[in-house]
Image: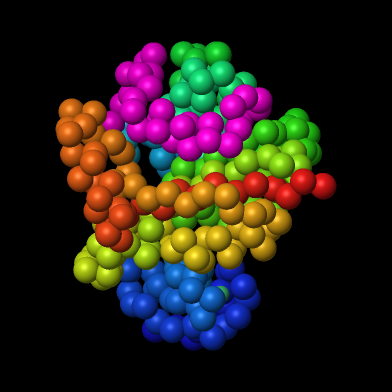
Amino acid sequence: MSAAPKCPACDASAVAEVGRAGVCDLWRCSCGFVFADRATWRDPYSNRDYYDPANQPAEEYPLRITTTERDRIASVRRFVQSGRLLDFGGGIGKTALAGHAAGFSAIVLEDSHKAVSDGKAHHPEIEWLEGKTIPDSIEDSSLDVITLFHVLEHLPDPRAALSQLHRKLRPGGLLVVEVPNWGSHMRWLHGLRWQFVLDHHLNHFTAASLTSLVEKAGFSRCAVEFRRTFAINEAQMWKEPLKKLLCFLGFGDILRCAFRKSAA
Ligand SMILES: [Zn+2]
């Protein structure tokens, strides 16, 4: 084990070793945040495109929106029903397409060149931006909604990202963040063999540590939800009430929180 690293959420160095997870060491801060030591971590996707067919099964276009994406947008529509929605790290664009179908003016920001070029060719009804941060072409305070589905756990500097998101949202704008739930009983049962301890997951959040990090960036939490699994299995919809019960009992592996930017 290396020397105790500084917490990327609060800068404290009072941390405890969680253990070795694949390519890096995981640590826990007294603030509750669990993170990969940046000194030992290497980005497994730094030299390749995440959506290259060698890494991911090829997608069929036009894309079909599923219950999973509609469920994500339902969490947005609890608070905001229309306007400009940017899906940060939006991948091949299914969540943004669900937003578009629900009446939003939808934008995808995605680092994968392949996802963006395929998206532009097949789905011009949404706007496509390639990159890791929101470009200057999106003006400050111009977005009504920003969503991050399974993005924040990948970012080496989540505070810097949240500060940009805060700037780009209008006062009162909505931020929806979904991440794996480190507070799940499943994680406790499986330890470091839990399914979301992965070489490209740098940050691990509980509802409390996510809320603390995002609220420090100038937001107020307005909703906490849990899901049992990453995606809803449309062939087994009868399992959904059972999964909801398991979430209620603390076995939700997925954490989804909504936050509002304080009105100016
Ligand atoms: Zn900390």
Please name the residue shown 77% across and 46% down the image.
Answer: 263
| Residue 65 rendering spot, x and y as whole percentages | 38, 22
Question: For the magenta stretch, what is the residue range?
Answer: 57-86
Question: Which residue is found at the position 30% from the left and 53% from the top?
Answer: 247
Q: Position of residue 160 (x, y in %)?
A: 66, 56
The answer to whether residue 206 is visible is: yes
Pick the front one: 240 or 106:
240
Residue 186 rendering spot, x and y as whole percentages: 25, 62
Q: Verify whether residue 74 appears in magenta.
A: yes
Percent from the top left, x then y, of residue 133?
64, 43
Residue 19 part of the magenta-drawn span: no
User: Which image quarter is the N terminus in?
Assistant: bottom left
Choose top left, top right, bottom left or bottom right for residue 127. Answer: top right
Q: Residue sitting at 48 percent across and 22 percent down? A: 97
Q: Nearer the viewer, residue 150 or 154?
A: 150
Task: From this view, report whether residue 190 is shown above or below residue 149.
Answer: below
Q: How is this picture coloured?
A: rainbow
Residue 157 seen from this side: no
Quadrant of ligand 1: it is bottom right
Report the number of numbered marks: 0
Viewer-proximal residue among 1 and 90: 90
Q: Nearer the viewer, residue 53 or 166?
A: 166
Which residue occupies 38% across, 54% down? Answer: 180
Q: Residue lying furthest right in this view?
A: 264
Horizontally, is 5 left or right of 134 in the view? left
